[in-house]
Image: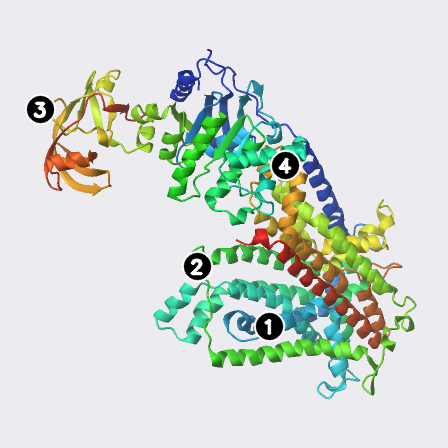
Amino acid sequence: MRDSPHQAVAVRGATATAAAEDPYLVVRDIAKMFGSFVALRDISLDVARGEFVCFLGPSGCGKTTLLRCIAGLESQTTGSIRQSKRDISRAPPGARDFGIVFQSYALFPNLTVTANVGYGLRSKRMRRKAIAARVAEMLALVGMPEAGRKYPAQLSGGQQQRVALARALAIEPGLLLLDEPLSALDARVRVRLRHEIKALHRRLGITTIMVTHDQEEALTMADRIVVMNQGVIDQIGTPEEIYRRPMTPFVADFVGTMNFMDGVVLAPGRVRVGDIELACDSAEGLAPGTLVKVCLRPEDIRVRDLGPVAPNRLDAVIEDIDFLGSFCRATLTLPSLPEAELVGDFSINLMRDYALAPGQPLAIAFPSDRLRVFARDGR
Amino acid sequence: MATAPSTAVSPPAARGFGRDEIIQRAAIVLLVAWLALTVLAPLWAVLSKSFQDADGEFAGLDNFVAYFSNASLVASLWNSLFVSLLSTAIVLPLAFVYAYALTRSRMPMKGVFQALSLIPILAPSLLPAIALVYLFGNQGFFKSWFPDGTIYGWPGIVIAQVFYCFPHALMILITALATADARLYEAATALGAGRWRIFWTVTLPGARYGVISAGFVVFTLVITDFGIAKVIGGSFNVLAIDIYKQVIGQNANFAMGAVVGLILLAPAVLSFVVDRMVQRKQVALLSARAVPFVPARKAGRDTVLWLYCLAVGGAIAGILGVAIWASFIQQWPYNLAFTLENYNFGDFHSDGWKPYWVSIKMAAGAAIIGTVMIFLGAYLIEKGRGFAWGRGLAHLLAMTPLAVPGLVLGLGYIFFFNARDNPLNFLYATLALLVVNTIAHFYTVAHLTAVTALKQIDAEFEAVSASLKVPFHVTLRRVTIPICLPAILDIAIYLFVNAMTTVSAVIFLRGPDTPAAVMIVHMEEAGRIEGAAAMATLIVATSAGVKILHVILSRFLNSRTQAWRRR
């Protein structure tokens, strides 16, 4: 549907960063059905040359399906894909220009690391010396220059992942596709590999698309994030845009933590939540009487330097405090909002200065420019 | 920059075909055509023949009516059911205890007992029957045990079948009993259940699908077996003998043979369907969280089981030993001097040693051609992309042979390939047809072995290969086949041994080339049982030799590829 919010979102996202040059990858109106199940709907996006894009979403949202359609491993039901101005919508995977790394690495177990990395080079009719040189170059690039003679079974998960990367990059593809490459690794290795992939990307400048369900990964690695939910794109934007200006409640909730309160618009810029009236800048464009969800990030709850008549000032009671190392997460209840249970992130400094403890009353304020509203029946 | 989506709704994106896909699709079509010709067409021929009269005209249900009103033919049906049920009832408990001993106890020499139990697979089904004749027949050592030749008849059939079917039941029961969840036993013990109670409420139900599956397999094996009934059945007629009589000989009534064949098809198809259903349930029994069960050492129980295995394993080896020994005896049982006379097959039959070489050629042909075709077929079906209905059809056809008894298939081959207007009838009565028949007969188990091995390989190899612009057949050669080599060898051995030992599939394929197993039947028919024993021994020796070669080759292969198989 041409005027659906998602089309507008996609277009907006596309304009935002790919303004100057022609986009490297153009995806238009992709839909994918498995029988009667709609896996993808109205998918349109642009990827600029050299950009690092993340497809982010919960399991089953269609992000891997979309990646496989771009790779040609699935064929879309309708829609078109253009890579570097070439229409590849109907091309089989062998005729497209991409390298892919899977969650399971898919290294050939009976071949050495050298043979694995050089696998795609044999068919390019390179001379043996040239192949060997390139393989050595790739292994050095991923930080494993000595691993050539080993077999995949002798490598750790992180090492196998790097070999898989080297193999995909050896043929110098125009597009690098990563399908949840870090999910099978443990936390420490994951963080390290995140940095390595990002460093690789910066060094090679290769257009990259990564699928992940981990929002922290997406926030740290991506130039732009495509947030997907149940087969449609909810928002495309930079990590900052996605986090600070989510456009749907789903994005607001999925990325980071979010407090939600039910309310109704009273006047432009003012909403009523329960018995209280709040000043809310982002409620400007909505008609009075609209049912809304009012959202606020835990770290945006203000405690310091509140005058007695600060706007949006509320009295709260601390129910519980979770110690998370560098900050504390407090569960707050408000007498004026009986059903609401809010979460606030308070730094250790704050905890000390105000001597916060469970059961203690606390005056808080919601900054009017940090509150976001979404119409209640919309997505 | 124009950012509005530029295209209207695109037409359904049917993907273009790369070269890889065209080759794969063509190969699948060929495979489907092959299977249709070698499995479906003969089956159809049997089906249609049963509705025809002697002149080939459509005769409705006349043949069926004639069958069921013929008292002696119907008597064979009851006879078949009787021996099958009795044999099953005897084999299942025997094999169950043996399997229990091998999987749930700590008795010593398990490897030896397992090897002993699998010996009958290396021999044609005729072998135990021949041994029984030597032991209890009219000139038998222990003929007083079955006076007046009463061994000829259902007692002989049942005893021989028990020996022959034992390893088949055992393998299934070992699989069923080997997968046990230790947590269930711990829970039962903690709740105070005694040993017998645990057996009835935990062990037996856990193995119930294996028992059901083994029961059906044995039942089908017995009811469709020809060799044993021929040698030791005497005047006790069973369905398999009926088919033989209706088709071979002066008063050949092909239509009636076809009717009996169809009746024989029923238990085989039923067994197949039940087995499929049971397979699915068996897999679900062992959840991912199960803890493997390790039996505790219990001296009393272990000793009893060891003695049991000694008795049963010894009996199996003994039967085999009798037949082998008898083949080297001058004049049983009077002159027990050693001789090699019985191996001068030329004395018994003008063909001499030729049938043996025919068998070797047939087995080698089936093993080589069959393995290549079956593995490549399984690869295309399992790892191919697109063309879902073609691959689905190929898989369905590949599963069909398991439901078709050898006799029925052989019958179909006569009807189909000997038909005058069939352009393929130049194949009839050739070695090539024997090879084709063998491959078709044993297709399914080999196919499933290949599919299982292929399923264990990462599903994305083909995608990686495509992304690296490497044609699929290069990856097949460099990666898939080396990884699957153990399974490929298993398939080759399976086809070879079965080709050497099968009787029922080839008994009808007359021609200048007669395989050894059929030769045994002829020699026995002519009363030259010593020649039959000799040929049977030869077959066992060949199968055993090839099997030993397989073991050596596997060990060698394993040690060579340890570097990357080892975790």
Q: Chain of mark 1?
A: B
The single residue placed furthest to the left in the displayed view is: A308
Give the mark nearest the N terminus, 4 or 2: 2
Numbered badge on residue B290: 2
Indicate whether B431 appears above or below A270: below
Query: How far across and how far down the image is residue A152, in percent?
Result: 54, 46
Mark 3, Cα crowd under 10 Å, few <14 / some 14-19 / many 20+, is: few
How far separated are the C-alphas under marks 4 and 2? Answer: 38 Å
> Which amino acid type is shown beneath numbered disc 3?
Gly
- The amino acid marked with disc number 1 is Ala
User: Which residue type carries mark 4?
Assistant: Phe
Residue B197, horizontal then vertical, whole percent: 42, 73
In the rendered structure, find residue B387 and report the number of the disc placed on it.
4
- To the question of a shared chain for discs 1 and 4, the answer is yes
Residue under disc 2 on the same chain as residue under disc 1: yes
Instruction: Between label 1 and label 4, give the one nearer the viewer.
Output: 4
Left or right, B317 with respect to A56, comes to: right
- Disc number lying in front (4 or 2): 2
Q: What distance separates the C-alpha of mark 3 from that of mark 1?
A: 91 Å
Q: Is residue B21 visible to us here?
A: no
Circle 3 residue? A307
Element on which disc 1 rests: helix
Q: How many discs mark residues in the rendered view?
A: 4
User: Do labels 2 and 1 touch, CB within 8 Å?
Assistant: no
Q: Residue at x 52, y 19 (%)?
A: B9
Tags 1 and 4 touching, CB below 8 Å: no
Mark 3, mark 1: which one is toward the viewer?
Answer: 3
Q: Which mark is residue B89?
A: 1
B319 left or right of B559?
Answer: right
**Mark closest to the chain's N terminus, 1 or 4:** 1
Q: Nearer the viewer, mark 2 or mark 1?
A: 2
